[in-house]
Amino acid sequence: MTFVQLIECRTSRLDEMNRLMDRWVEQTKGKRTATHSVVAKDRADATHVVEIVEFPSYEEAMRNSGLPETDRIFREMVALCDEEPTFTDLDVVRDEQLYAATARRFFELAAGQGDAPPFNDVFIEDYHDHDPANVQDVIGLDAVRREVEVWRGGFDFSFTIEDQIAQGDRVCTRWTWSGHHKGEFLGIPPTGKDVTMTGTTVHRCTPDGKIAEGWWEYDRLGLMQQLGALDPLEL
């Protein structure tokens, strides 16, 4: 679960503090575990400074705090403050940007060859997939992997993310799929053709950022047409 630390202090020496932070970033290059940091100044009180630091987890934050460089910089930062800084530890319970990143991660992982990856850092164990092309919904990580392996067996493919919108616990992704038909797919022998299709997927995410449910809409008919799998009377 993503972890955020909120650091508040009062100082009239913000420029010196910024230079101190620049030095810490340089000294901890390749060691620090923070993924994002924002320093903000209160518009109503210029001496009130807030730093928001994001980590992949609480454990990573503690590892970052244990760096000798962090301890040294912290003592110098306290000396620049008018009073002792305060710390608030926050577990993130909702992050729409995180949800969008998880959805993008799935589309990256789906492409490839051979056995599908575990997907357990992307989906919950009983993930529920709604695909109108399937007679029954796909439920569970094992079923998702088998579904991906069907596509991997038939194509070398990739997704291009065209648009993404996150709202609440939902992420909508508009994508373009491009593939090379290298193997049998749904009974269609390999044609060697390069094919494309477009689609949209809506994912529902859990508070810890994993995907719990997905709804697909895509141009499967157009794909079959490109593969020469449709009788002219079906077009």
Image (cartoon, helix red, strand yellow):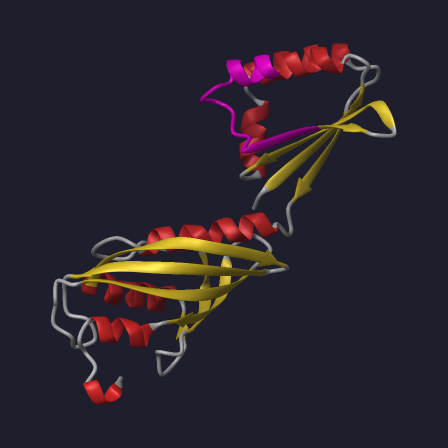
Q: Position of residue 9 (x, y in %)?
A: 79, 23
Q: Residue 163 at what x, y percent from top left?
A: 48, 55
Please state which of residues 15 and 86 is positioned toward the viewer in this rendering: 15
Q: Is residue 186 visible?
A: yes
Instruction: Tell me the quarter of the picture where residue 126 sits.
Output: bottom left
Position of the C terminus, as image quadrant, is bottom left
Residue sitting at 55 percent across and 26 percent down?
A: 64
Whether 208 is drawn above or below 133: the answer is above
Task: Tell me: 162 left or right of 92.
Answer: left
Image-based side of 210 in relation to 133, left or right: right
Left/right of residue 205 with respect to residue 156 in the rendered view = right
Residues drawn in magenta: 22-39
Residue 48 sits inside the magenta stretch:
no
Looking at this rendering, what residue extends furthest in the bottom direction? 233
Looking at the picture, how far across and down is residue 35, in whole percent? 54, 33
Q: Quadrant of residue 147?
A: bottom left
Residue drawn where x is 48% and y is 19% of the image: 29
> Could you say which is closer to the camera, residue 73 or residue 99?
99
> Which is more toward the observer, 207 or 201?
201
